[in-house]
């Protein structure tokens, strides 16, 4: 289960104006659920949960099993919404350090090393990658809705040529995930007979994690995609009504705070493996809401690490930010040992777990920041599981859509992203 606690925002809300504002949040929710708002042709991320396609989930799992049997390394080529969702879930549910194939329980299906490619334009990364791949069995999943995005297209050219010169069965090892009809990737799939999955027309990149775009790499990493998917399905049904709806509380409070001058939101977590989820959240909110010179700037932080870099600013800098903590109960009981000499003075912690100390760091931070003038909310998961991550995905997608409607923008387009591309392509002399 996931829970939202907004008690550390209450002191910053004026009850009367909050009451006046609440009907607008309900109206934005109805606009979304009735499909009557701007961009309603982009609501496929809700449709796939309302009408689950188990045959497709099975097909994705079969292809993932093929990859797991074949590959030492899986290259996931894509950028923006075409890789952040997969990375978020894979990182959240994978061990912090690689497990050797001997240590993996099921030897018939070991988890390939997952490497993301095509999410930047670093030549050094590409050169080192191709050296690293030498002697390894490689599969590649190429994700691009448009099939025209420059970064993954360049990466795919390198990877394809490298694979074709190393393997006889490249046509099976490369899997394309793209628009149902248009784009260069469909031309490749037709010409080279690559297996292909479709990102439905009505699903945009940053809403595509529960389509094949996210699910295939996630399944290849050994994650239970059924639990992930059906976690989101459960959340969709729990957030159907406006009464007691946590996504509406979150979206409403964010918008209220924005109107009060809190223009930056920091999504902070205390667990390193949630960094990918934070990056996915950041893209979802930035591209959906940042329009018409308005919106909340979505910023991310990994605590307690970043308390030692931006902690001073948060506690004492400009008072225009609020925080959302993404918290997961850490089940690991790694107990701090006693030390006879106690030279570090830590014996007062002997017998406590590191996660208990981490929890105190979280509770202390949320209290100190509230007292310092930073309203904060907490979204917590009782366990870091596929199901709860599925719930989080839908929760944030629902909230950002409501947030976009509260701002009066179409949350499902990103016209601003084109400006840099136009300048870049003009410098590159694209025909
Ligand atoms: O959310 C979005 O739509 C974008 O971030 C896209 O996912 C990103 O630009 C990549 O686009 P494409 O999948 O067409 O290569």
Image (cartoon, helix red, strand yellow):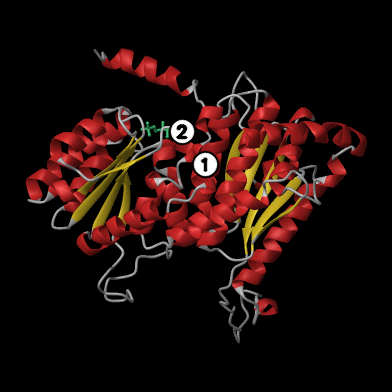
Q: CA distance from mark 2 to mark 1?
A: 9 Å
- The residue identified by callout 2 is 202
Residue located 69% across and 36% down the image: 29
In terms of image quadrants, where is residue 253? top right
Q: Quadrant of residue 57?
A: bottom left
Above or below for 300 versus 27: below
Q: Which residue is mark 1?
A: 47
Along the viewing direction, whichever of 40 and 88 lies nearer the viewer: 40
In the picture, measured across the screen, residue 122 lies left or right of residue 327, that is left
Local crowd at mark 2 within 10 Å, few (<14), some, or many (≥20)? some
Helix, strand or loop under label 1: helix
Query: Could you tell me residue 79's position as x and y percent?
Result: 38, 37
Classify the position of the C terminus by image quarter. top left
Query: Badges 2 and 1: C-beta atoms under 8 Å apart?
Result: yes
> How many labels, in total?
2
- Whether residue 317 appears in this view of the structure is no
Query: Horizontal and vertical percent for residue 252?
Result: 75, 38
Disc 2 on helix, strand or loop? loop
The extreme right residue here reads 16
Which of 405/125 is in front?
Answer: 405
Quadrant containing the N terminus is bottom right
- Residue 306 % position (x, y): 59, 50
């Amino acid at each position: 289960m996931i829970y939202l606690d907004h008690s550390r925002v209450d002191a910053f809300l004026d009850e009367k104006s909050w009451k006046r504002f609440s009907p607008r949040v309900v109206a934005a929710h109805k606009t979304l659920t009735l499909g009557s708002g701007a961009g309603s042709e982009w609501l496929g991320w809700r449709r796939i949960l309302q009408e689950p396609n188990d045959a497709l989930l099975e097909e994705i799992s079969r292809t993932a099993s093929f990859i797991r049997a074949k590959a030492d390394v899986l290259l996931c080529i894509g950028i923006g919404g075409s890789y952040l969702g997969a990375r978020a879930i894979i990182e959240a549910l994978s061990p912090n350090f690689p497990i050797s194939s001997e240590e993996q329980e099921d030897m018939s299906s070991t988890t390939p090393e997952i490497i993301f490619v095509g999410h930047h334009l670093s030549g050094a990364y590409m050169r080192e990658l191709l050296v690293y791949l030498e002697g390894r069995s490689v599969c590649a999943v190429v994700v691009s809705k448009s099939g025209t995005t420059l970064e993954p297209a360049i990466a795919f050219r390198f990877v394809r040529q490298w694979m074709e010169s190393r393997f006889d069965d490249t046509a099976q090892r490369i899997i394309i995930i793209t628009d149902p009809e248009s784009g260069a990737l469909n031309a490749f799939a037709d010409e080279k007979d690559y297996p292909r999955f479709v990102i439905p027309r009505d699903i945009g990149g940053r809403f595509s994690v529960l389509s094949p775009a996210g699910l295939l790499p996630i399944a290849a990493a050994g994650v239970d995609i059924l639990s992930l998917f059906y976690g989101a399905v459960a959340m969709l049904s729990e957030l159907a009504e406006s009464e007691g709806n946590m996504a509406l509380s979150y979206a409403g409070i964010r918008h209220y705070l924005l109107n009060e001058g809190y223009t930056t939101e920091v999504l902070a977590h205390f667990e390193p493996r949630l960094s990918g989820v934070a990056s996915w959240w950041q893209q979802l909110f930035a591209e959906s809401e940042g329009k018409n010179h308005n919106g909340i700037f979505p910023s991310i932080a990994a605590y307690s690490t970043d308390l030692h870099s931006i902690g001073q600013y948060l506690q004492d800098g400009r008072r225009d930010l609020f925080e959302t903590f993404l918290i997961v109960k850490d089940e690991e009981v790694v107990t701090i040992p006693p030390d006879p000499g106690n030279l570090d003075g830590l014996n007062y912690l002997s017998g406590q777990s590191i996660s208990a100390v981490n929890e105190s760091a979280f509770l202390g931070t949320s209290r100190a920041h509230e007292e310092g003038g930073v309203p904060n909310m907490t979204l917590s998961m009782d366990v870091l599981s596929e199901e709860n991550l599925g719930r989080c995905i839908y929760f944030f997608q629902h909230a950002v859509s409501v947030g976009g409607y509260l701002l009066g923008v179409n949350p499902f387009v990103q016209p601003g992203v084109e400006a840099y591309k136009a300048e870049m392509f003009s410098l590159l002399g694209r025909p």
